[in-house]
Image (cartoon, grey):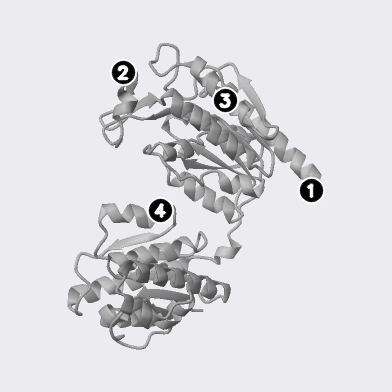
Amino acid sequence: MGRKIVILGTTNTKAEQLRFLKERIMARGHEAILMDLSMGGDPGFQADISPREIARLVGKNLEDLVASKDRFSVTNAMSAGAQQKALDLLSENRLDGIVALGGATLALIGSQVMAKLPFGIPKVIATPAAMPVYVGRWFDATDLLVMQLIMEIAGMNDLVKNALSQVAGAIAGLVEESGDHRALKLPYPSIAVTELGFSDQCAKHVEDLLVEKGYHAYPFHADGVSDRAMDRLIAQGFFDGVIEIVPAGVIETKYKGNRAAGMQRLDAALERGIPQVWAPCCLNLTGAGPTRANRDKYIASGKVLKIDEMRAMARYPMDEFLDGAKMYAEKLNKAKGPVKLVVPLKGWSSLEHEGSVLYNPEEDRVFVEELKKHLARPVEIEEVDCNLEDLKTARALVESLIQFMVREKKDLD
């Protein structure tokens, strides 16, 4: 049976190409639903969903929007309307996949629409404007595919037809190989784990210990993207617990670090109330390499550990470090379920050991004391006399989480 594929485009500028793409998708046996996001000019042909309908969904009149000549406002209105329409189609079981075809503005709108859709629904952006500065913004933490078209989408020459046929094949193939996103389930109990290169051993120990106990471990790299994607999955109902070895995306956001994950990082699990155990990996360290925009204040102390040509690490200045303690206490105060912090006393990463310029357990202790001052709810803090990478830390993390999980299961029974 054919699947329902939504096409986003602007018929006033790409009528021929959108018609061709729709026909190629239909030739594969699928239903193609064209959503026209034209922001002025006459439509090349009648789409299944008109731009007037999209504007009305957000209380706007298309003619008034276009007459305003305020491109920013028009784009925002059409994006909001398209997001609402996509969600409506999803609720009506009329959206199994989605593809956006157009330039930079259409690709941006497409990415915003796709970010609203659940994990597992095939999503494709096809554009000649796939510049690196844009692509990162489009991807964000969404499971989408960007196809770079090497020619402008103008006319219907052989190169354009070949590219559009590939776009049709890409989205059609994805939906054909995808199951119902609503049927995607993880085995119980499934645990999400954050990690990065400076916590490799801890993460490996944690994952091995979880598997030994009959749990299913799903690691995510705390690079500011994968950990945000994990949060989205948690918000969708995936995972039964979390071991946050590296919750550093919040302080990285506040102080513009390379691993910034947004100020909403951690909120999904806190809001759902699933059991969590945190370690403090990299809450005290930040990048100080050549890619760091504001690196001067982080290298000012001279205590910088060079990792390679692109990376170096430094400790946060004390004012930012203590501000971070307050931010994380405020996060913990939001928890609707059990949460615990496991604190190694001899370094919070593989970079911190006696003799390292980054090793400062006295400062780390000040952070913990500051965090305690701002806690408005009981939070157990277990100190372990070792480095984060030692097996002892992993055991404390896993045993603590399992205690929460067993207790929660008893309460449900």
Q: CA distance from mark 3 to mark 4?
A: 33 Å
Q: Which mark is residue 412?
A: 1
Q: CA distance from mark 2 to mark 4?
A: 34 Å
Sequence-first tag of 1 and 3: 3
Name the residue: 53% across, 65% down.
179
Is residue 193 visible in the rendered image? The answer is yes
Sequence-first tag of 1 and 2: 2
Give the crowd class for mark 4: few <14, some 14-19, many >=20 residues within 10 Å.
Answer: some
- Do residues under tags 2 and 4 come within 8 Å of each other at their CB atoms? no
Sequence-first tag of 3 and 4: 4
Q: Position of residue 130 (x, y in %)?
A: 27, 59
Left or right of 113: which side holds 165? left
Q: Position of residue 120 (x, y in %)?
A: 50, 61
Camera-nearest label, 2 or 3: 3
Camera-nearest label, 1 or 3: 3
Q: CA distance from mark 1 to mark 3?
A: 35 Å
Q: Which mark is residue 34?
A: none
Camera-nearest label, 1 or 4: 4
Kindly indicate the quadrant of the structure image that contains residue 35. bottom left
Camera-nearest label, 2 or 4: 2
Q: Is residue 346 above or below residue 242?
A: above
Find disc 2 in the rendering and name its residue.
302
Find disc 4 in the rendering and name its residue.
140
Give the crowd class for mark 3: few <14, some 14-19, many >=20 residues within 10 Å.
Answer: some
Amino acid type, residue under disc 1 in the picture: Leu
Which sits in the foreground, 211 or 142?
142
- Callout 1: helix, strand or loop? helix
Find disc 3 in the rendering and name its residue.
370
Which sits in the foreground, 363 or 268?
363
